[in-house]
Image (cartoon, rainbow, N blue to C red):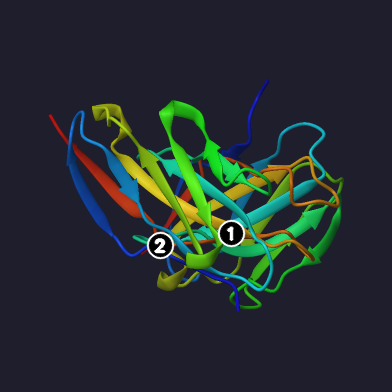
Amino acid sequence: GAGVSQSPRYKVAKRGQDVALRCDPISGHVSLFWYQQALGQGPEFLTYFQNEAQLDKSGLPSDRFFAERPEGSVSTLKIQRTQQEDSAVYLCASSSSGGTPRREQYFGPGTRLTVT
Amino acid sequence: AQSVTQPDIHITVSEGASLELRCNYSYGATPYLFWYVQSPGQGLQLLLKYFSGDTLVQGIKGFEAEFKRSQSSFNLRKPSVHWSDAAEYFCAVGATSGTYKYIFGTGTRLKVLA
């Protein structure tokens, strides 16, 4: 079946622009995660959804970052007034788990954001 | 606080040689542990996972990892490396409560010499 897809794969934004990154999780997956991967680093947790509920947004670096999953499937990560330090690969992952960590997360290919 | 350390940023091995990538974790309870591989421009692919039970875990592509509680380690091994194994490898610990988010190490980049 189809895996996690993300769009766009590459995004170049001028500093100060708003961007929206989309994630299509595996169909039926309850849990959805967003991670940020800076160059040369491991992914870092941003936020977590269980169905449409955002249960954890502790990793969002500032109030310029906003995520939503209104119907419990597709999710959008929005970054307002982008800054150069926002340049990174943004990874989305989904899991069939709604209440156990035993279900592994399946990752999308990521969106590489470059802020100029 | 939970953390994962991958001490080796880069490792170079010859094709056919054995491989061991190190991973140390800090976690209050028995963690859930994962190894992922990331090829250039690709997402993360799960190699193997440890939840409980047998401490030697077999994964895909001929990889295995051993959980050693006394050393807080979960090292990844492969007896004979292939050129196609060149990639970046990430160890992660999964929270066992709350969000179940993953905490990743900084990765080890593997180069394979022909």
Which of disc 1 and disc 2 is earlier in sequence? 1
Q: Are marks 2 and 1 on the same chain?
A: yes
Q: In front of the other: label 2 or label 1?
A: 1
> How far across and how far down the image is residue A25, in percent?
70, 38
Q: Which mark is residue A3?
A: none
**Residue at left 18%, top 41%?**
B13
Most distant residue in the left direction: B114
Can residue A87 be seen in the rendering of this structure?
yes
Q: Nearer the viewer, residue B40 or B84?
A: B84
Q: Nearer the viewer, residue B10 or B72?
A: B72
Horizontally, is A87 left or right of B46 in the view?
A: left
> How far across and how far down the image is residue B18, in percent?
26, 37
Q: Which mark is residue B106?
A: 2
**Residue at left 65%, top 60%?**
B31
> How far across and how far down the image is residue A1, in percent?
68, 20
Q: Which chain hosts label 2?
A: B
Answer above or below: position of B106 versus B13: below
Residue type highlighted by circle 1: Val
The image quadrant that residue A27 belongs to is top right
Residue type highlighted by circle 2: Thr
Q: Nearer the viewer, residue A55 or A89?
A: A55
The image quadrant that residue B30 belongs to is bottom right
Please give the residue where the numbered disc 1 appears in the rendered image: B93
Q: Quadrant of the N terminus of chain B?
A: bottom right
